[in-house]
Image (spheres, rainbow, N blue to C red):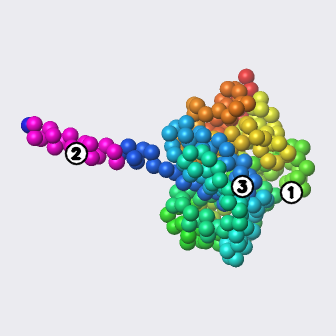
Amino acid sequence: MKRFSAALLLLLLAVLPVAGAAQHQVVRILAIGNSFSQDAVEQNLHELAAAEEIPTVIGNMYIAGCSLERHVNNARENKAAYAYRKIGQDGRKVERKRVSLEEALADEAWDYITLQQSSPFSGQYDTYMASMPELIDYVLSHAPHATLLIHQTWAYAPHSTHKGFANYDNDQMTMYRAITEAVRKASRKTGIKRVIPAGTAIQNARTSALGDDLTRDGFHLDLVTGRYIAACTWFETLFGRPVIGNAYRPQKMTEEQQRIAQQAAHAAVRRPWRITPLGEAKK
């Protein structure tokens, strides 16, 4: 019996470290985007994951205003055109300039890679289909084991002076509906089944006491609440855990703002294609 017990103990000691390691496996996330992916992933996402003891490496391939068409052209010509912003497991951000997509795709064994359209064209389905299939083929040829997602971005503020707003009659709801329809159709057509509904999360929050803006300039998210809502949406989509109750809150954010933001993101993940009014959040 003693010999059996000793053998069992040795077996448990051999297995337990492996199980523990699996629980703390690093999740590697790369956004091929622009300033809207900057708003979503370069702050708060690492901290939200760390609050749940999920180690991450987060990359953002950044060109301001970059469209899917430009990403494809960069891939074709292997242009070192990006600022590659990378947040390591320690939360420290490092930026390398003049990096190509090929270099970034080879830099890590990425688990998730996201694609998105530039904001003026984000509600125009034809612009997705003109470039996204080729970009998908390129990405998967360099990172075949990665899961692809589409980042559904947000509509502009009602008062926005962005010239792209004219594509949507300068109307926030027209733009929001166009974005959700374009992304939903592109998701179905390309076979990318997972969508990060940041646009719906922002629109949910706009039904609350936070107001109908949540931007700093009419189109980029405000530096505290707007960015936090987007990161919460990425967190819940990627990790499959409810963000409601996550302990991380940025400086200058109140507990009430945190509660509304988490509710907005959670509701968007549950219902990515329609607005969930946050009536209770107004109280």
Amino acid type, residue under disc 2 in the picture: Leu
Residue named by callout 1? 164
**SS class of the residue under badge 2?**
helix
Left/right placement of residue 6 relative to residue 219 reads: left
Left/right placement of residue 248 relative to residue 119 reads: left
Residue at point 81%, 42% (across, down): 215
Q: Quadrant of the N terminus?
A: top left
The quarter of the displayed image where residue 76 is located: bottom right
Residue named by callout 3? 181
Q: Are marks 3 and 1 in contact (CB under 8 Å)?
A: no
**SS class of the residue under badge 3?**
helix
**Disc 3 to disc 2, C-alpha distance:** 54 Å
Residue at point 82%, 48% (across, down): 219
In front of the other: 110 or 179: 110
How far from the left and from the top, in percent, is residue 248? 61, 34
Question: Taking 130 as reference, is 246 above or below it?
Answer: above
How far from the left and from the top, in percent, is residue 240? 52, 44
Helix, strand or loop for the magenta stretch, by majority: helix
The quarter of the displayed image where residue 139 is located: bottom right
